[in-house]
Amino acid sequence: MRTRAAVATIAVLSALGAFACRDVSSPTRPQAPSLAKPSGNTVKNVSVAPSTATVAVGGKVQLTASARGAGGRPVTNATFTWTSSAPAFATVTAVSPTSAEVTGVAPGTATITATETNSGKRGSSTVTVTGSPPPSGDPVLVGAGDIADCGSTVTGDDATAALLDGIAGTVANFGDNAYPNGTLSEYTNCYGPNWGRHKARTMPSAGNHEYNTAGAVGYYDYFGAAAGDRDKGYYSYNLGDWHVVVLNSNLSMLADSPQVQWLRADLAANPRACTLAYWHHPRFNSGESHGDNPATQPLWQALYDANADVILNGHEHIYERFAPQTPTGAADPARGIRQFTVGTGGRSHYTVGTPKPNSEVANGSTYGVIKLTLSASSYAWEFIPVAGATFRDSGSASCH
């Protein structure tokens, strides 16, 4: 055991040794403080999000750039300049040190590049400009069903959400929006980061996966009042000159059910010339996974009796358009309802089987959204695919 005296002796000898080892031939100089290099000099790479986007002519989409240094660490205080490879198709304007707004000018593709100011490092996003702008004042309804899945690595939901970023208007989803069970956690963590960006302008509908959770409480808790009465899930609203009805195909659809009786009363009180409805399960379906759903026929009958024009559904993970037809599937170009199945929100693809009567177009390999421009006495539709896909469908028709 060392004594205090021994410890003191060691301390003195150590100090003398340190002094003896010091080079005293030149005076000591105070060291200059170390100066960190500017953050721009540490930049190793630049990325732009989203990496691909689609925007309509006249539409806008926002891009955000970020810089990373060694080890993938974020570089703070980085600033960027922005350029477009094809200003004839898309222009770009900086709106903050790290973000820019892209405006669609004409149909085509442009590469939008962000260059970090200090390092010159670059990142880019490919922006596809589609279609033409709707006539001034005509509202737009855009949507799809069968969207996000917490148990999947498929990123189709991110790609379809990027389409919404560039399309103004009201967003509709057609059910099975958050797999596998539509819990509040699944909505928050899987639907929320992509389609949830547009929650404030979404008029939702529920699918069977929402009801895997008792009472679809996750769906109703997430969307709140926008989803209607949580004991019903059906409601209506007006969009320009159109009346829009949202129905719940997870509840009874018998002719004398509360839902069908409410639907008939709602339609009778509707003075508008054009009517559109959407819900999850399609009456007619050429997909191999589910096929037709006759249980929805009373909904069809009520809508047909009221001269409705368009029905939108999900459930089958395909895109399909039918010619106007009756609730029993007979062609009726004068009074028939046109059905679109748009189960293309990003969860997965299903196989298209033998086309059902009156099926005009079907595709089972493309994620995308349907965009409806709703004029006073007509409508135009456009299926817009995710970036990199080529299948498209478009057309127009008059209201009854």
Image (cartoon, helix red, strand yellow):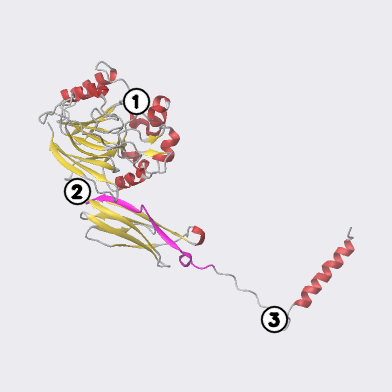
N-term-proximal mark, 3 vs 1: 3
Residue 27 got which mark? Answer: 3
Q: Is residue 55 magenta?
A: yes
Label 1, residues with CA under 10 Å away: few <14, some 14-19, many ≥20: few
Residue depicted at x 72% and y 84%: 25
Q: Amino acid at mark 1?
A: Asp
Label 3, residues with CA under 10 Å away: few <14, some 14-19, many ≥20: few
Q: Secondary structure at mark 3?
A: loop
Q: Is residue 8 magenta?
A: no
Residue under circle 1?
229
N-term-proximal mark, 3 vs 2: 3
N-term-proximal mark, 1 vs 2: 2
Q: Amino acid at mark 3?
A: Pro
Rendered position, 74 above or below 175: below
**Measured Cα–Cα span from mark 3 to mark 2:** 77 Å
Is there any visible trace of residue 3 in the rendered image? yes
Q: Position of residue 59 (x, y in %)?
A: 25, 50
**Measured Cα–Cα span from mark 3 to mark 1:** 84 Å
User: Which is in the foreground here, disc 3 or disc 1?
Assistant: 1
Q: Which region of the structure is painted magenta?
A: 36-57
Q: Secondary structure at mark 2?
A: loop
Q: In terms of image quadrants, where is residue 265?
A: top left
